[in-house]
Amino acid sequence: MLAVVTPVHYAGLYLEDNMKKLVLAAALAAAASSATAGAYSEPVIEAPVIVEETTSSSTGIVLPLILLAVVAAAVAAN
């Protein structure tokens, strides 16, 4: 038995195929737009903070000067 296919049946298949393609295209477009939502920007790299601890040169010389002054005062008192 031969199936009789009417032109209305062809139109239904045509529209169904087009709708599938349209839905697929819309899904791909939505996925692509969310994947490229942000623009590329250079990463911000902050310079490391370098802290130098320096020893004060006056600290090393003040104590001997005070001792010298005390000795000089003791000698001058005698």
Image: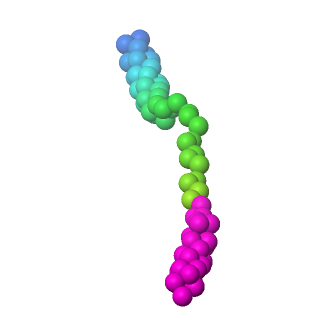
Left or right, 19 with respect to 76, comes to: left
Q: Is residue 32 in the magenta section? A: no
Q: Quadrant of residue 75?
A: bottom right
48 sits left or right of 19 in the view: right
In this view, 37 is above or below 48: above
Q: In the image shown, does 70 or 65 lie closer to the viewer?
A: 70
Magenta stretch secondary structure, dominant: helix
The image position of residue 29, as x and y in percent, is 47, 27
What residue range appears in magenta? Answer: 52-78
Give how far across and how far down residue 35 sits, in percent. Answer: 49, 35
The spot of residue 15 in percent (x, y) is 40, 18
Residue 27: horizontal and vertical position, in percent? Answer: 43, 30
Residue 3 sits above or below residue 66 on the image: above
Residue at position x 40%, y 22% in the image? 19
User: Does 21 appear above or below 42?
Assistant: above
Placement of the C terminus among the 4 image quadrants: bottom right
x 56%, y 81%: residue: 76
